[in-house]
């Protein structure tokens, strides 16, 4: 069984994203133990406060990932490695012998200090998604990956 943690800056607020995330968590439950940790997003009022807020969120991310020193720490970022669904499935299956932690930044992206804590960088797309949608896309791709390597009728 896969052991996965998703660390996300900010919570999913839109009900339709919440519903989609819950649906994929339910579908994944027979195949994976998934824990979602939501970190507080740092508020900012103007452009001048963005760097301070990003640094504060970075400190929260570092603290959160430090609990998983034995895990693969994967930061989701548009500059990360791109894979198709079949490649992602194979990649996930190869990593299934240890805990995998996926980290999703908030609207400000990753702080340069925090991103150094990643074992690797992964991209869901070259497009930029809001963190809520990124979490849903990640969950859907995790389900698709499991369906592929378990031979389930979901992919194609």
Image (cartoon, rainbow, N blue to C red):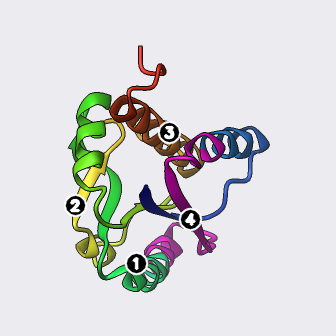
Q: Dot 2, crowdedness within 10 Å: few (<14), some or many (≥20)?
A: some
Considering only order in the chain, which callout, 4 or 3, is on the residue closer to the N terminus? Answer: 4
Residue 15: x percent and y percent?
78, 44
Tell me the distance, in whole angstroms, between the alpha carbons under discs 4 and 2: 20 Å
Name the residue rendered at 42%, 85% in the picture. Answer: 67
- Disc 1 from disc 4: Cα separation: 13 Å
Dot 1: what SS?
A: helix
Disc 1 marks which residue?
Answer: 65
Q: Earlier in the sequence, mark 1 or mark 4?
A: 4
| Tag 4 residue | 35
- Residue 29: x percent and y percent? 59, 49
For mark 2, what is the residue? 120
Of residues 153 and 139, the one drawn nearer to the viewer in this rendering: 153
Residue 53, above or below 107: below
Q: Is residue 42 magenta?
A: yes
Taking the spot 43% from the left edge, 62% from the top edge, the residue there is 3
Looking at the image, is 152 positioned above or below residue 32?
Answer: above
Residue found at x 44% / y 76%: 61
Whichever of callouts 1 and 2 sits on the residue coming sooner in the sequence is 1
Rendering coords of residue 2 (x, y %)? 41, 56
Closest to the observer, 90 or 15: 90
Is residue 59 part of the magenta span, yes or no? no
For the residues marked 3 and 4, what is the alpha-carbon distance in whole angstroms? 16 Å
Give the mark nearest the N terminus, 4 or 2.
4
What range of the chain is rendered magenta?
A: 25-54
Q: Nearer the viewer, mark 1 or mark 4?
A: 4
Query: Which quarter of the image is occupied by the N terminus?
Result: bottom left
Q: Earlier in the sequence, mark 3 or mark 1?
A: 1
Q: CA distance from mark 1 to mark 2?
A: 13 Å
Q: Earlier in the sequence, mark 2 or mark 3?
A: 2
* Residue 104 visible here: no
Identify the mark at residue 137; answer none if there is no mark.
3
């Amino acid at each position: 069984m896969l052991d996965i943690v998703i660390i996300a800056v900010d919570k999913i607020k839109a009900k339709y994203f919440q519903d989609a995330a819950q649906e994929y968590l339910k579908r994944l439950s027979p195949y994976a133990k998934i824990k979602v940790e939501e970190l507080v997003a740092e508020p900012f009022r103007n452009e001048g406060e963005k760097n301070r807020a990003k640094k504060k969120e970075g400190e929260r991310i570092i603290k959160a990932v430090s609990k998983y020193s034995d895990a693969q720490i994967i930061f989701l970022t548009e500059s990360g490695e791109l894979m198709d669904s079949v490649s992602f499935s194979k990649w996930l299956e190869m990593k299934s012998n240890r805990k995998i932690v996926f980290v999703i930044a908030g609207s400000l992206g990753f702080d340069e200090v925090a991103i150094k804590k990643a074992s690797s960088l992964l991209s869901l797309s070259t497009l930029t998604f809001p963190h809520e949608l990124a979490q849903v896309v990640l969950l859907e791709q995790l389900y698709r990956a499991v369906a592929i390597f378990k031979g389930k009728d979901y992919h194609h």
